[in-house]
Amino acid sequence: MKLSIQVSLNGLSFCILNTKSNTIVYYHKKIFDKELDPINLLQKIEEEYNTQSQLKTPVNEVKLCFCNTLFTLVPKKWFKEDAAASYLKFNTKILKTDFVAIDEIDDKQIVNIYIPYTNILNYFFEKYGEFEYSHHLSILLHKFLSFEDHKGIKIYAHNRNKQLDLFAIEDGKLLLCNSFSYSTGEDYLYYLLFVAEQLNLDPKKFSLNLSGEIHKEDEIYKLLQDYIQHIIFLSSEISYEIEEGWNINKSEEYILLNTL
């Protein structure tokens, strides 16, 4: 059994894969009414383990993904591990007590430096022992950079809890990556068109690839259609089955499913 967990200050997602039958046998999502702090987030995780009996299923492998904006990307050739915290200081407020982690993005010569929540790490370590953890941006970058069709420039937009993660990739190389908080569809459109302007892109020519919490019925999508000509919805191309009874939106849970 393999357990995938997605953790953010806005919510939690859990997924269990039976590796013998190659089937997802459990899925659970919890959205909070408001953004929490890491202390209250841990309490919510404990509540889920107390109320969701399936989470007591013995597992052989655990993968934990942190979703937050406490990150920065550095080209590997410029990265020095003993100076990891100093890179974050340019765009993230960090404390002396914060633990700094790194993910190397495959062979793309990119290092993602980020801050996981130490109390959450300790909780899962006590529960499972050794386990893998990563940042959500690393999961997305790994997936987007692995696509074979990367001729020209493509824009990828992942949506989660009023947070827009934007990526620009040209011929398989990352040009830009940033994360924006938005309140309205107009905010969303502004950030997208701003990025296009910075890269001298014509909105009628580049393709916009959407994933996460966005649907064709959303006002944001209708607004995008007025400006962007080529829009594609990404769905997790999973190689396993989903047990009957578990309704998983493959685009909405793009990160969780690609963590497995």
Image (cartoon, rainbow, N blue to C red):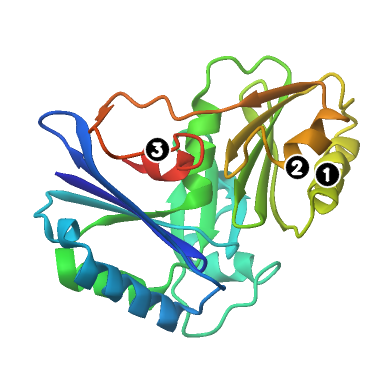
| Residue at (54, 39) in percent of width and height | 141
Q: How far apart are marks 1 and 3 (CA)?
A: 27 Å
Please name the amino acid that badge 3 sits on.
Asn
Q: Is residue 25 visible?
A: yes
Q: Distance between the residues labelled 2 and 1?
A: 8 Å
Left or right: 33 in relation to 116: right
| Residue at (80, 49) in percent of width and height | 185
How packed mark 3 is, by other alpha carbons closer than 10 Å (few <14, some 14-19, many 20 or more), is some
| Residue at (50, 41) in percent of width and height | 252
Left or right: 258 in relation to 136: left
Please name the amino acid that badge 1 sits on.
Leu
Q: Give residue 156's mark.
A: none
When asked about the image quadrant of residue 42, the answer is: bottom left
Toward the viewer: 49 or 257? 49
Q: Mark 1 points at which residue?
A: 189
- Secondary structure beneath label 3: helix
Left or right: 185 in relation to 156: right
x and y percentages locating residue 113 in the rendered image: 53, 59
- Secondary structure beneath label 1: helix
x and y percentages locating residue 206 in the rendered image: 79, 22
Q: Is residue 217 above or below residue 213?
A: above
Q: Choose the circle earlier in sequence order: 1 or 3.
A: 1
Q: Give residue 258's mark.
A: 3
Q: Name the residue under label 2.
A: 220
Toward the viewer: 245 or 257? 245
Q: Choose the circle earlier in sequence order: 2 or 1.
A: 1
Q: Choose the circle earlier in sequence order: 3 or 2.
A: 2
